[in-house]
Image (tube, grey):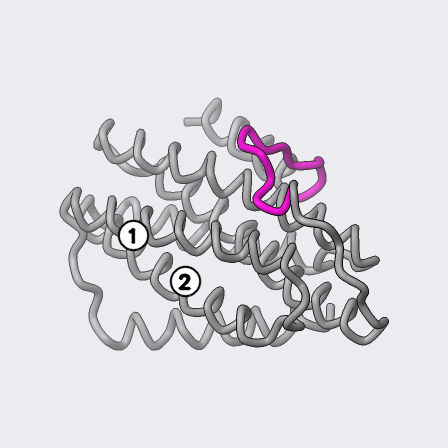
Amino acid sequence: MLDKLIIEFDKGLRTIAAEARSGRVHPDQSIAEAPLESDQKRQIASLMRINHCGEVCAQALYNGQSLTSRNPEIVAALKQASQEETEHLAWCERRINEVGGHKSLLNPLWYAGSFTLGALAGAAGDKWNLGFLAETEKQVGKHLQSHLELLPENDSKSRAIIEQMSKDEASHAEAAIKHGAAELPKPIKLAMGLVSKLMTTTTYHI
């Protein structure tokens, strides 16, 4: 277990501090940059910062869940989802840099909290572990869809990134349900929504 914790600590440092890399071509790779006003760039940077922070949290959740899960098949599914979330990190980070923004200064805090929640979910048992994963992805999907409405109409680059992320998140949720995810109790869903609201509100500015 000590070795696993050291490995997870290293993963956390890499997620927070290292430059993420994508195995897939960035969704906006072939899309030209549109003329953007300074206030539009600030809006894009804030939205993509939220999305980037969401992917940091997702990485932490998956790593925590895989640490305590005892089912090899579920661990493999979590690792696959985690790999795609790493690609999302890379896409968001590059877009943030392109519009002159910065990543959230609160990422270490959100990573630590999300990792702890993931570890608790994994220890609760497979069906609850998967249920937590599925609900997380559903809520992330809703945030991504709302961001599509808030982006400047001519920002096709950010739109392409968010649309692909949304597809991937839906796929993760479907995989969790397929593997036997349980429906989480309503109070837990509400609590997750409140935490998510806190994260998005603070990360928009910090």
Distance between the Cα atoms at labels 1 and 2? 10 Å
Q: Could you tell me residue 133's position as x and y percent?
A: 32, 52
Please name the residue shown 38% across and 33% down the image.
80
Discs 1, 2 touching: Cβ within 8 Å? yes
Identify the disc placed on residue 173: 1
Please name the residue shown 49% across and 44% down the image.
59
- Is 18 within the magenta? yes
Q: Is residue 139 above or below residue 167?
A: below
Secondary structure at badge 2 equals: helix
Q: Is residue 130 above or below residue 202?
A: above
- Is 2 within the magenta? no
Q: Could you tell me the amino acid type at mark 1?
A: Ala
Q: Is residue 163 left or right of residue 44?
A: left
Residues rendered magenta in the picture: 16-29
Corner quadrant of residue 123:
top left
**Disc 1 packing (10 Å; few <14; some 14–19; many ≥20):** many
Query: From this viewpoint, is residue 143 visible?
Result: yes
Q: Check disc 2 and report the residue beneath it.
A: 141
